Image (tube, grey):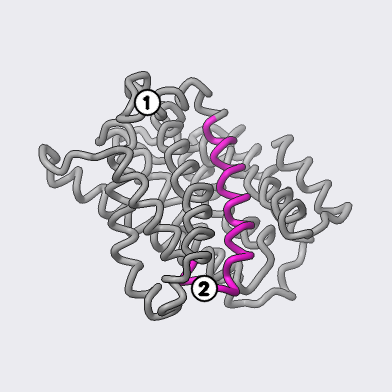
């Protein structure tokens, strides 16, 4: 997966027609899940993709993984969506370019963070961005209280003490959280300005092109290894193509603070993915945090 482009940031955006399918008809069918179902499905996909990416880092490094993820996702989305390049205003292009820059920065910062600190804790810190957005975008005290409850669960999931973590990793995760909040805003704006997932495809291409020099500098010829490319493409589908499409569709029908509070579930999903894929077991305290976040 916002502050809408209107003057009232907490009002629900006017729903865009999502029943008309794209070239493959997939976005139309995904829309039948409902906005909350779309967000939850996207969260599951992105966190299990993140766990897979951690296993890929010894082969290509953090920058290499991000580059493969963005490139593969851009190719897939451009082929499937076949977005129009003409007929868009300067504001449309400005929105999609900023969206692409935000996606590239968010991915780069996050994967550099999980290269230094555990996946569950990185997501715990990263989700502070959407939580802060939910409070800032909301005009109702009750929403701030629910966000505060979720925030308590986030800190509990982190064990209540982040002092023993790599400070660079913590800073990178917090930076990724700021980019995540920005991503929510521009994902919603892009979804309202472009039909179906066209804006997402164009933004992903922008992100891939901007990140490519960093990936080449960081991974070099390792980016051409067939096994690495195959695994990177799998990460792209799980962590970019599916979740970003699902979130873009959801943001057409959800207000900013609702979407941002749903993002509070991400640490719980990440902890589950870490346990199943990476063998990272939950402690009793972390299990209690998962329950608290879900309750919120």
Indicate which disc, 1 or 2, sits on the residue closer to the N terminus. Answer: 1
Which residue extends farthest right? 284
Residue at the (25%, 35%) spot, across then down: 193
Residue at the (30%, 35%) spot, across then down: 7
**182 or 136, which lies in front?**
182
Residue contact at pointers 1 and 2, CB within 8 angstroms: no
Work out how far the residue at label 1 is from the one at label 2, CA to CA, in angstroms: 34 Å
Classify residue 37 by image quadrant: top right
**124 or 6, which lies in front?**
124
Residue 1 at x, y percent in the picture: 47, 42
Residue 129 at x, y percent in the picture: 52, 54
Q: Say the numbered circle drawn on residue 60.
A: 2
Is 221 placed left or right of 231 in the picture? left
- Using a 10 Å C-alpha cutoff, classify the residue at mark 1 as few (fewer than 14 neighbours), some (14 to 19) or many (20 or more): some
Our reading of the magenta stretch's main secondary structure is helix
In the rendered image, the vertical position of residue 239 relative to residue 138, given as above or below = below
**169 or 48, which lies in front?**
48
Q: Say the numbered circle drawn on residue 25.
A: 1
Residue range in magenta is 38-65
């Amino acid at each position: 997966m916002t502050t809408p482009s209107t003057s009232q940031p907490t009002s629900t955006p006017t729903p865009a027609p999502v029943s008309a399918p794209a070239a493959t008809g997939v976005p139309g069918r995904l829309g039948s899940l409902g906005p909350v179902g779309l967000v939850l499905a996207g969260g599951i996909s992105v966190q299990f993709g993140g766990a897979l990416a951690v296993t890929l880092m010894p082969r290509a490094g953090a920058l290499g993984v991000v580059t493969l993820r963005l490139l593969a996702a851009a190719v897939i989305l451009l082929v499937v969506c076949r977005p129009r390049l003409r007929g868009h205003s300067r504001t449309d292009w400005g929105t999609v370019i900023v969206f692409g820059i935000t996606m590239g920065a968010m991915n780069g910062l996050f994967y550099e963070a999980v290269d230094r600190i555990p996946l569950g804790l990185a997501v715990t810190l990263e989700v502070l961005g959407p939580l802060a957005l939910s409070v800032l975008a909301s005009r109702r005290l009750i929403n701030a209280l629910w966000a505060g409850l979720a925030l308590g669960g986030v800190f509990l999931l982190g064990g209540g003490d982040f002092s023993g973590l790599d400070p660079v990793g913590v800073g990178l995760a917090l930076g990724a959280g700021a980019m995540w909040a920005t991503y929510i805003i521009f994902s919603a704006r892009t979804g309202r300005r472009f039909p179906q997932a066209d804006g997402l495809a164009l933004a992903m291409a922008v992100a891939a092109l901007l990140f490519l020099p960093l990936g080449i500098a960081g991974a070099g010829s390792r980016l051409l290894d067939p096994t690495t490319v195959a695994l990177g493409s799998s990460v792209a589908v799980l962590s970019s193509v599916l979740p970003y499409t699902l979130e873009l569709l959801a943001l057409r029908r959800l207000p900013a603070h609702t979407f941002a509070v749903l993002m509070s579930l991400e640490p719980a999903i990440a902890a589950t993915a870490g346990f199943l894929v990476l063998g990272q077991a939950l402690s009793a305290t972390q299990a209690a945090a998962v329950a608290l976040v879900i309750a919120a």
